[in-house]
Image (cartoon, rainbow, N blue to C red):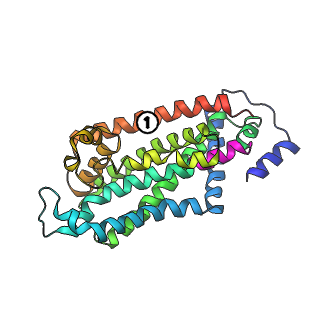
Amino acid sequence: MTTSLAHTSLTHPSPARPTSARPATAVVDAVTMLRRNLLHLVRYPGLSIFTIGGPVVLLLLFVFVLGGTLGAGLPEVDPAGGRAAYVAYVMPGILALTIAGSAGGTATTVAMDMTEGITARFRTMAIARAAVLAGHVLGNALQALVAVALVLGVGLLIGFRPTAGPLGWLAAAGLLALVAVAVSWLGVAMGMQARSVETASNLPLLLTFLPFLGSGFVPTGSMPGWLQWFAAHQPFTPVIETLRGLLLGGPDPVSAWPAVAWCVGLAVAGWLWSTALYERRSVR
């Protein structure tokens, strides 16, 4: 797809399009770039397998190896509940971890396009500039949501039993989509910031660690005092607590608004960061 796009431009040069392309044209270009990124995911399934396989392995490890002990120690939970109680507790954290892990694939793909000169080639073509980045974001967000659905399916098979109604599921899906978009923008920015593909694959690990340093796997109150403040206020903790409330009980109003605010803030930060890098570093 990439080669064909470049080849088409070389043999049939298109007239230069103004930087401020019409919104309708930018949307068409974004859909074209989305198709390119989806084809890339199909042709290189290794990144998708890792995005899904990693969280599934961690889910099985935490539930069947550590779940009995960790579940018995949860506050306000019958110690006899053990593993079954822990499945319910850890599943929102695993879903957040799945989305956070998807940023690695995005950063790697973006870095490959940058180092191979494909992004610079796109800038010479009649493509809306915003469409190149939007294609990466939409492609990764869709991949992350598919991975979340598959990981959730594994959770249901091993005993996760959500009690959410239709509105609860709808709200949870909306929040997960918002997290996926925010993480995707950060992944794009990290991929453009990195000097090599190897560096790009490592930078998003910072996002992957955050669910572990929040309420994803154990209550923040069980952590050392010096870590509790960070664990309670970092971006993924309100997201995880809101998902936990939506899937297993009523929504947590204390966590819902901070969760949405963090997602919007991170998405805007990632968009500003990646746009600035695109204008400065994509010409090589």
Classify the position of the N terminus by image quarter. bottom right
| Residue 139 seen anywhere in this rendered image of the structure | no
User: Relative to residue 21, is residue 245 depicted above or below?
Assistant: below
Which structural element holds mark 1? helix
Magenta span of residues: 107-117
Please state which amino acid type lies under the numbered disc 1. Answer: Leu
For the stretch drawn in magenta, what is the main secondary structure? helix
Tell me the residue that label 1 is attached to: 266
Q: Is residue 206 magenta?
A: no
Task: Measuring from the top left, give residue 232's x and y in whole percent.
Answer: 26, 41
Q: Is residue 166 left or right of residue 124?
A: left
**Residue 217 appears in which quarter of the rendering?**
bottom left
For the residue pair 148 and 190, the one nearer the viewer reads as: 190
Q: Residues within 10 Å of mark 1 (few under 14, many from 20)?
A: many
Foreground residue among 191 and 229: 229
208 to the left or right of 7: left
Quadrant holding the C terminus: top right
**Residue drawn at (74%, 30%) of the image:** 17
Q: Residue at x 66, y 28 (%)?
A: 280
The image shows residue 20, relative to residue 270, as above or below, that is above
Residue shown at 38%/69% (left/top)? 154
* Residue 164 in the image, given as x and y percentages of width and height: 25, 58
